[in-house]
Image: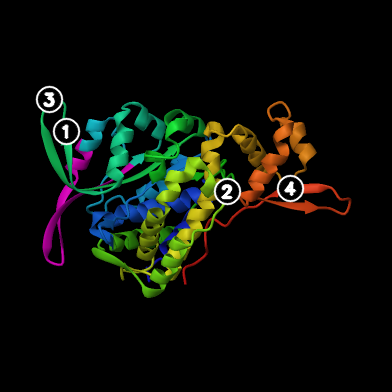
Amino acid sequence: MRKAGFWLESYMKYTQQSEAPDNYHLWTGVSVIASCLRRKAWLNWGFFDIYPNMYIILIGPPGARKNTAISIGVALTDGIKGIFTGSDCTTGPALIEAIKECEIEDTIDGKSFRHSSITIVSKEFVNFITVDKDLITWLTDLFDTHAVWTYRTKGKGTYPIKGVWLNLIGGITPTGFSKVVPDEVIGEGFPSRVVFVVADGPRHLKARPQLTLAERQLRLDLVEDLHTISQIKGEFNLAPDATEWYTNWYENPIEDALRSDKRFSGYFARKHIHLLKTAMVVSACTDDSRIVSQPHIEYALTILEATEAKMIEAFGATGRSIMSSDIDDVIKLLKKYKRISKDQILSQIWRDINPMHIDHVFNMIKEMDLLTVEVDVNEKVWYKWKEKPETPTKVS
């Protein structure tokens, strides 16, 4: 067990005074652990190895505290040997140069190997990928870690980079997202490799947060654990219970409205990869065994599915459905009020929503398991937002 206990749970306690939403902190914590594991940890998957690099993008309006969450997490890795971060790679050549510069020699079981592991921190992701449009293509390719990745320069020949491993944590607004991810690529390529973490704004307002002595000590414990995690080397394995659970989950998928949405087809085709990467991170949060147990993979699925429930908001009206903007507007009202009736919704957004669609909108949201329906003593129908748990309390 780690000094801080289950690392992600303890990290959530450490950040509890921050105004940033819970799910921002949770997934920033996942990215931090991944940045410590680097290319030195993997899960053998037959024809290829799965590495714990992840692309995580926090989506929310200006002032949602995306930068706050990222800064708190990334700061914990300062000074840990061998962990490289880059934040000013605004062009393709700059990104490749940053990857090349972090190439180091390491050993596993007495065998020497070279790898180039880096975490890109992009607090304004829209700026990161609009300066050089080739970046999206490169990021898509680099997500699938390469033993040797050959960079072809314009007029200057080629040179190989060994053991490329790219981790990414960034922030973007819904408007920025719609600009950089056009309709025709939503369900494929780069977006399908990303875990989009959506929130509406700060979880609370704290005029002047002050860390307690216990929280300061917890920070020290978290950092010490990151130093330990950064020393993990070697292959991860699924425990027998995890293998049985995963096999049943993978071979008997549960259909839902989100899975059937064409915009998410690419993501769901790779969901098992996201799940296994996250499960490796969860395992590393507990000990150095490099064993992924059933509780680890179940925890990973819980936080992924809680995130997926909000993922539709990341796409908002960007999708192809003519009702997508109506759905987006109703979801925002459901989340704003404890309960709301149809007439109250129409009174607020009647200028923007098509009244002919309203029943279909409610049915779509209900099918996504995002609302509950109640009927009071006067037989008035009320709709309530169904919040799914974002942070399981423990891994047993």
Q: CA distance from mark 3 to mark 4?
A: 62 Å
Q: Residue at x 55, y 49 (%)?
A: 309
Q: Amino acid at mark 3?
A: Gly
Which amino acid is tagged 4? Tyr
State the residue position of label 3: 155
Task: Choose the circle earlier in sequence order: 2 or 4.
Answer: 2
Q: Secondary structure at mark 4?
A: strand
364 falls in the magenta region? no
- Mark 4 lies on residue: 383
Closer to us: 101 or 310: 310
Report, in whole angstroms, how far the alpha carbon at label 1 lies from the one at label 4: 56 Å
Q: Residues within 10 Å of mark 3 (few under 14, many from 20)?
A: few
Q: CA distance from mark 2 to mark 1?
A: 42 Å
Asked if one can make out residue 17 in the rendered structure from this viewpoint, the answer is no
Q: CA distance from mark 3 to mark 2?
A: 49 Å
Magenta-colored span: 97-120
Say whether residue 354 is left or right of residue 387.
Answer: right
Which residue carries the number 1 mark?
152
Q: Name the residue that disc number 2 marks.
A: 257
Of marks 1 and 4, which one's residue comes earlier in the chain? 1
Q: Closer to the N terminus: mark 3 or mark 4? A: 3
